[in-house]
Amino acid sequence: ETVKTLLDNLTPEQQLKLITVQDNDGNTALHIATQQGYTDTMKTQLDILTPEQQLKLVAVQNKWGKTALHCAADSGHTETVKTLLENITPEEQLQLLYTQNKWGNTALHDAGRPGHTETMKALLDYLAPEQQLRFLSTQNITGSTALHYAALFGHTETIKTLLDILTPEQQLKLLAVQNNEGMIAVQKAAGRYTNSDTMRTLEHYQNEADYRVNYRKFA
């Protein structure tokens, strides 16, 4: 309500200038609202803009290359993620989903590191089934996918959610993606002694998918 009241007292030109101004870190008011999960505040900002202005604003990257979507995903604000993506067209959604920050991370990477499973599901829901594997296979500057991150930090339920949306053939492809060190996800999990459950889960999916794919070939 405070933001709405403030904006209502400005001309359209003043509203646009206030909403799009960036601080020393390159953050707009939209970055800050999404980082905190202030969905209504975010929506108030977007509602006063034209579709073209909305797209321009959500595409703004701060000095770390993060968009407002990265900020919402990193903090696990699922409803904020959904509202942000629902305000743009499917083509614009794709563009925003694939935007990579300074380290090559998409919003999916940023949600995967802390294990925000529901947020990752929400991001993937905006993609057609044939697009999901490509998105999951996106690698950052270290060659890591979101699955590598989930494996490294022991987010077992996140891993199950990501792999369950794929076919056995797609599972094998994602599980075989190597980072710049030549490591696949199960090897990243094996690098930490606390990740034994995660490692077993990845091995289970690998073995099950392997069996199903090979069984179909020879059945």
Image (cartoon, rainbow, N blue to C red):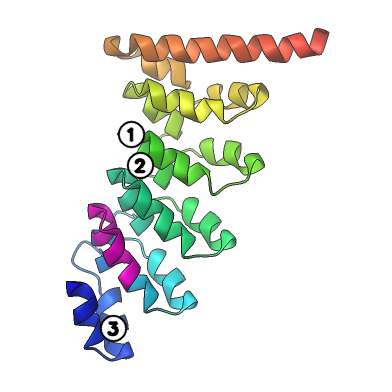
- Real-space Cα separation, disc 2 to disc 1, in angstroms: 6 Å
Q: Disc 2 marks which residue?
A: 110
From the image, state whether disc 3 or disc 2 is nearer to you: 3
183 is higher (above) or lower (below) than 74: above
Question: Which residue type does callout 3 highlight?
Answer: Gln
Instruction: Identify the residue at image location x=26%, y=53%.
Output: 37
Asked which secondary structure carries label 1, the reply is: loop
The picture quadrant where one finds residue 154 is top left
Residue beneath the point at 37% across and 71% down: 46
- Residue carrying label 1: 113
Give the Cα separation between the discs numbered 1 and 3: 35 Å
Report the number of discs: 3
- Above or below: residue 138 compared with residue 98: above
- Residue 8 seen in this snapshot: yes
Label 3 – label 2 distance at C-alpha: 30 Å
- For marks 3 and 2, the one nearer the N-term is 3
Tag 2: amino acid: Asp
59 vs 169: above or below: below
Q: Which residue is mark 3?
A: 15
**Magenta part of the chain:** 33-44
Residue drawn at x 19%, y 80% as measured from the top left: 6
Residue 49 vertical position relative to residue 196 in the rendered view, above or below: below
Q: Residues within 10 Å of mark 2 (few under 14, many from 20)?
A: many
Looking at the rendered image, the quarter that the C terminus falls into is top right
User: In which quadrant of the rendered image does the N terminus lie?
Assistant: bottom left
Residue 38 on the magenta span = yes
N-terminal of the pair, mark 1 or mark 3, is 3
